[in-house]
Image (cartoon, rainbow, N blue to C red):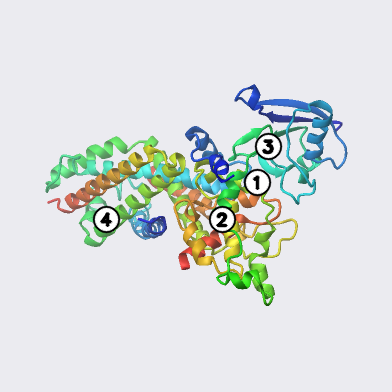
Amino acid sequence: MRERNIMLLHYATGLGILVFGAVHVFVVFFTYPLQGTIWETTLKFDNIPFAILPVYRNAILAASLWGLLLCTTIHSMNGLRVIFLELLGERAAMRVVSRVLYLVGAIIMIYGTRTIIVANMIT
Amino acid sequence: MQKVVFRVKRYIPERGPKSYYEEFEVPFRRGMTVLDGLIYIKENLENTLSIRYSCRMAICGSCGMRINGIEMLACNTQVAELGVPIITVEPMRNFPLLKDLVVNMDEMFIKQRRLKTWLVRRDTEEQDNPTSQYLQSDEELVRYLQFSYCIQCGLCYSACPVVATFPKFYGPQPLMKSYRYIADSRDEGGRERLGLVDTSEGVWRCHFAGSCSKVCPKGVDPALAIQLLRRRVLTS
Amino acid sequence: MGLFLVHNERTRASVIQSLKVMLYPAKYGLERWSYVLQRISGVVVSLYFIAHVVETGNFVGGPTVWGPVSYEAAKRSYEAAEALLKNPVFDIGLGIIGFLVAFHTFNGIRLILAHFGVTLGKPSRPEPPYLPASFSNKQRAIFWLSIAAGVFAILYTIDSLMGVFR
């Protein structure tokens, strides 16, 4: 991919994180009753509207969580690629680093998607 | 303040690859610039000190160096305005060092040439034997005038953190110069130049650290030029 | 002449030296600080993100679980993971992550705008004292906004995890 398209993707995924991340942070940090800490409310497993299990069971929230996973993976792996590129330049090690970052990104996507699907199917 | 101490970074290739600092005491006088101090050292204390200077009035761009850790023109910096008794003088970064405070600036000029930083006209016949003047309005002039004030001193190139880490990056000065011609209404080589800067070594390596504009002694603002260049790249 | 010139062009820099320049923000003004902080926060948040995916994976039973789980098993592994993470060290760590995320977000918006030439000044006739148009107040205001957002985030996160300000 050309550098221009990569950087446009970087901007786009950054804005994607802004949207999906806002949903994620809002659900966890801005919906709990102010009497307790979030350990006692939204970070409990069940019972509260935005506790862990209800969040994953809600199709829209789970989908936005997957969008956040995708955007963050692309954005962070590309960000690390830029930093490594500027540190290593044209060295042979850069090609290794680039492949490792692709691999790490793929593993994060597969593992994270599995977590969302499995948590969605808890019976 | 009677005396100022100049802590000069010395590098003499014949005496081995290591640089070292040498201190000189220079009598202070009112209105003395750092360059005056260095010339005093060369004339009276240590005549092997190598410096490069010419006009002594911030026009030629020869005496760029790092003074107290930041890039400045030695002729344009008064000792009194620094306000410290010890002045550390180092050569510019990001250039191969030749001797003492003298660096080889070829790299920047090669990159500049690669980006076609001259007026490109499709009708070269007409350019060689012009039949009329290339007229410009005042607004068209202001669009690039600021960027044409560059004296090619290399301070921005030395200050840029990306050039320091990734030497293949074109650097602030060549990219700025490229934009200066793209923004010129008389120029017709814009498309070609945009193709050259729209690469991994071009505008995309600029992360707007702003150090180039911070150190520029002529108010050229390379950071602004590169952002505007990137905008041209994105909208073309 | 051409060959001689090409020979003098550097193609690589020492990695240690590069890191020193990349991570040292002083003396070059606010934009350089933004560059360094954006890099550091990006790397730290990326590492946190990886750790977060691993840790939420543990909430449903770790990397061996690839099919449906029962409610009891999921609740058990969730509570085991929760017991590990529920202590002040992780709470304060998450507060710092909150600062970095909020800073990186708003500073990222500022950088996207600046990269498109928005919020910067226009080229003008240079006159002393040569204030660069790219160091515009708008762009700097967004930088300070991102610092403020980061401070709010660290306070809010630590408060909501530990309840210290109530």
Q: Is residue C30 visible?
A: no
Q: Residue furthest top?
A: B15
Of C89 and B182, the residue lying toward us: B182
Q: Disc 2 is attached to a residue of which chain?
A: B
**Residues indicated by labels 4 and 2 sit on the same polypeptide chain:** no
Q: Amino acid at mark 1?
A: Leu
Q: Amino acid at mark 2?
A: Leu
Q: In the displayed structure, does residue C115 sit left or right of residue A113?
A: right
B63, above or below B223, in the image: above
A120, above or below B138, in the image: above
Q: In the displayed structure, does residue C1 sit left or right of residue B203?
A: right
Q: Which numbered disc, 4 or 2, marks the residue closer to the eye? A: 2
Of B79 and C162, the residue lying toward us: B79
Q: CA distance from mark 1 to mark 3?
A: 13 Å
Secondary structure at badge 1 equals: helix
Q: In the displayed structure, does residue B56 sit left or right of residue C75?
A: right
Which tag, 1 or 2, sits closer to the chain's start? 1
- The x, y position of residue B55, in whole percent, is 79, 47
Q: CA distance from mark 1 to mark 2?
A: 14 Å
**Residues indicated by labels 1 and 3 sit on the same polypeptide chain:** yes
Which tag, 1 or 3, sits closer to the chain's start? 3
What residue did someone put label 2 on?
B175
Secondary structure at badge 4 equals: helix
Q: Which numbered disc, 2 or 3, marks the residue closer to the eye? A: 3
Q: Amino acid at mark 3?
A: Val
